[in-house]
Image: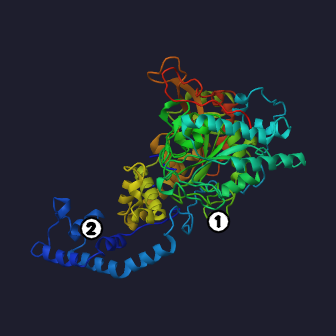
């Protein structure tokens, strides 16, 4: 989920006295030593130069930026922490923190991204009105079928030009064929897929059609639990873990008739693209990696290995992989999709969203998975309008300096009022706020993991292990101050949005990624072109993808979707296929031949 923070909410946090209690609970001898050490030098503010000598209370308090206490006050704090805080801490950990991943006992303190300008809308529980695709005919080869949209594939199934079982076999073969190159699959779910596909075909034979996802294969990021299959979180520590829990998003897709064909790679504990089995590659250039922890869902959708996949974002893990792999990806408004049964980094930042072949497909999937999850207090029935019915000629859309100009021109030609735009806010610690929020929240969910020393086996030592050790020393008061600053950011971004209905800009600008996740606004990443890579192998079609992001206010996902659909209706960048069968003569990666149909 992470690519590498009035006040709306407070989440899990740690406190200065609690942490001081931890630091000094092992032996009261340290207090006596401190008293001796400071005889005759009680007014000193200098820490020892060597870290090995840094045993004084003053040095410890400086770690918390709290060196303003005098010696007597510091000793009182340590005594109180030992006698009062530590027993409470241990009791609470025993109650709620013995299991990693944040799957149980969510915080009662809930983030709501709703703005004053959007809070009066009523929830829309009606399904969207999808465009007709009655003229769709089945292609003569599986390759062309694999790159059809959900809406097109749904029409093939509805008109019985193909069965769900046939379609499922096509995508299972592609997953097997290309996984050796891209490293996107953690677990194949063939037995379950065959069962669900047959059920979809049987329902259709009885005249029951569940909608555009009826019989459509898909993949789930492997932080989403499905009974009887491993949910590894991409981590060596949890690579054999089986959670017999049906994630809410899986339930929604199952109810819509979709067919799960694979659990797809998550970066280890939802960070970057490194996992216990390797590192996921970019289908457009296999010398590159996919970036972001939703690497498996993005790469597999881009390569035509699944028609769509569900990923997650806490800090860039939908935006970055979608941009790198040249695929359409939607990060919805925070709270749109329930997260029961999903590993948690931060309860106020985590979001689930689809990777698809088009913006219209993203709308179809969002329609199926949105809605209130009774076990996720952050989820809501968000009052979307139907994106297929939005009149874009009534919209005013801003464009930033880094927006792709082709998108600006296309939307202007479609009747959208396009205006230069600058996103103004005064909060200058956005990236730090996100790090404080994400790291402390994750530490609450992986407290036992750290305490047991399991972080020493983590795949990328300079990332989560280092960040979460540092997070152990974030005082509660400063965590709360970060959330107050977050509230200020939200109000300023809301004010900046008052002149536009949406804006366009680079979806992978890190400051913008942090801002968007803290505020909870939606963004859809759309492919806008390709460019040559530097020093390509001879006779290769490897490319670097070009994308842009369309951002909207919270609960206005339908506006971003409508604008993306308008752009894609007259361009074909989203229809391009990556060159995974044309790697170049110097490539050493072996692609096995496709097995015969069963």
Q: Is residue 182 above or below residue 83?
A: above
Q: Mark 2 Cα within 10 Å, few/some/many (few <14, many 20+)?
A: some
Left or right: residue 564 compared with residue 447:
right
Q: How many numbered markers are drawn?
A: 2
Q: Which residue reaches farthest bottom?
A: 83
Residue 491 coordinates in the image, percent (x, y):
52, 55
Pick the front one: 471 or 100: 100
Report the side of 234 relative to 252 (left or right).
left
* Along the line of sight, the residue nearer the viewer: 164 or 488: 164
Q: Which of 312 and 396 is in front in this view?
A: 312
Q: Are marks 2 and 1 in contact (CB under 8 Å)?
A: no
**Residue position for label 1:** 375
The part of the image, by quadrant, that contains residue 108 is bottom right
Q: Element under label 1?
A: loop
Q: How crowded is mark 1: few (under 14 residues within 10 Å), some or many (20 or more)?
A: some
Q: Residue furthest left?
A: 40
């Amino acid at each position: 989920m992470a690519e590498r923070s009035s006040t709306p909410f407070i989440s899990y946090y740690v406190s200065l006295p609690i942490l001081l209690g931890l630091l000094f609970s092992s032996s009261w001898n340290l207090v006596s030593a401190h008293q001796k050490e400071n005889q005759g030098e009680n007014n000193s503010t200098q820490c020892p130069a060597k870290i090995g000598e840094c045993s004084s209370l003053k040095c410890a308090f400086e770690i918390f930026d709290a060196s303003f206490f005098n010696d007597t006050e510091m000793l009182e704090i340590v005594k109180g922490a030992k006698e009062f805080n530590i027993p409470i801490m241990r009791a609470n950990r025993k109650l709620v923190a013995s299991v990693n991943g944040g799957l149980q006992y969510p915080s009662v303190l809930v983030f709501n991204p709703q703005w004053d300008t959007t809070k009066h809308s009523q929830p829309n529980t009606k399904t969207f009105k999808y465009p007709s695709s009655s003229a769709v005919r089945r292609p003569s080869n599986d390759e062309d079928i694999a790159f059809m949209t959900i809406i097109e594939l749904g029409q093939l199934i509805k008109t019985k030009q193909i069965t769900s079982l046939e379609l499922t076999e096509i995508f299972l073969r592609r997953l097997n064929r290309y996984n050796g190159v891209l490293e996107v699959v953690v677990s194949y779910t063939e037995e379950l897929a065959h069962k669900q596909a047959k059920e979809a075909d049987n329902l259709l034979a009885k005249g029951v059609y569940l909608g555009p996802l009826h019989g459509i294969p898909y993949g789930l990021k492997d932080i989403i639990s499905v009974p009887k299959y491993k949910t590894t979180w991409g981590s060596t520590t949890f690579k054999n873990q089986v959670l017999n829990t049906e994630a809410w998003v899986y339930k929604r897709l199952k109810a819509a008739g979709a067919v799960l064909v694979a659990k797809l790679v998550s970066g280890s504990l939802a960070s970057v693209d490194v996992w216990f089995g390797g590192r996921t590659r970019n289908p457009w250039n296999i010398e590159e990696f996919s970036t972001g922890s939703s690497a498996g869902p993005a790469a597999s959708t881009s390569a035509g290995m699944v028609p769509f996949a569900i990923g997650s974002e806490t800090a860039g893990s939908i935006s970055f992989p979608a941009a790198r792999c040249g695929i359409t990806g939607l990060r919805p408004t925070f709270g749109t999709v329930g997260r029961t049964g999903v590993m948690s980094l931060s309860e106020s930042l985590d979001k689930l969203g689809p990777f698809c072949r088009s913006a219209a497909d993203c709308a179809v999937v969002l329609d199926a998975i949105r809605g209130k999850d009774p076990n996720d207090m952050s989820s809501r029935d968000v009052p979307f309008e139907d994106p297929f019915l939005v009149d874009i000629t009534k919209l005013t859309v801003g464009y930033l300096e880094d927006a792709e100009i082709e998108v600006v021109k296309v939307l202007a030609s479609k009747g959208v009022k396009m205006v230069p735009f600058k996103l103004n806010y005064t909060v200058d610690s956005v990236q730090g706020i996100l790090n404080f929020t994400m790291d402390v929240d994750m530490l609450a969910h992986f407290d036992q993991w750290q305490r047991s020393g399991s972080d020493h086996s983590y795949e990328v030592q300079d990332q989560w292990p280092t960040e979460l050790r540092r997070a152990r020393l974030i005082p509660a008061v400063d965590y709360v101050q970060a959330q107050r600053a977050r509230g200020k950011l939200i109000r300023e971004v809301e004010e900046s949005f008052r002149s536009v209905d949406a804006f366009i800009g680079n979806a992978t600008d890190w400051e913008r990624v942090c801002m968007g996740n803290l505020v909870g606004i939606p963004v859809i990443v759309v492919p806008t072109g390709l460019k040559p890579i530097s020093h390509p192998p001879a006779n290769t079609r490897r490319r670097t993808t070009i994308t842009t992001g369309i951002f909207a206010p919270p609960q206005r996902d339908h506006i971003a979707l409508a604008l993306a659909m308008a752009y894609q209706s007259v361009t074909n960048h989203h229809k391009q296929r990556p060159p995974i069968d044309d790697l170049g003569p110097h490539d050493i990666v072996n692609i096995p031949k496709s097995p015969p149909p069963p």
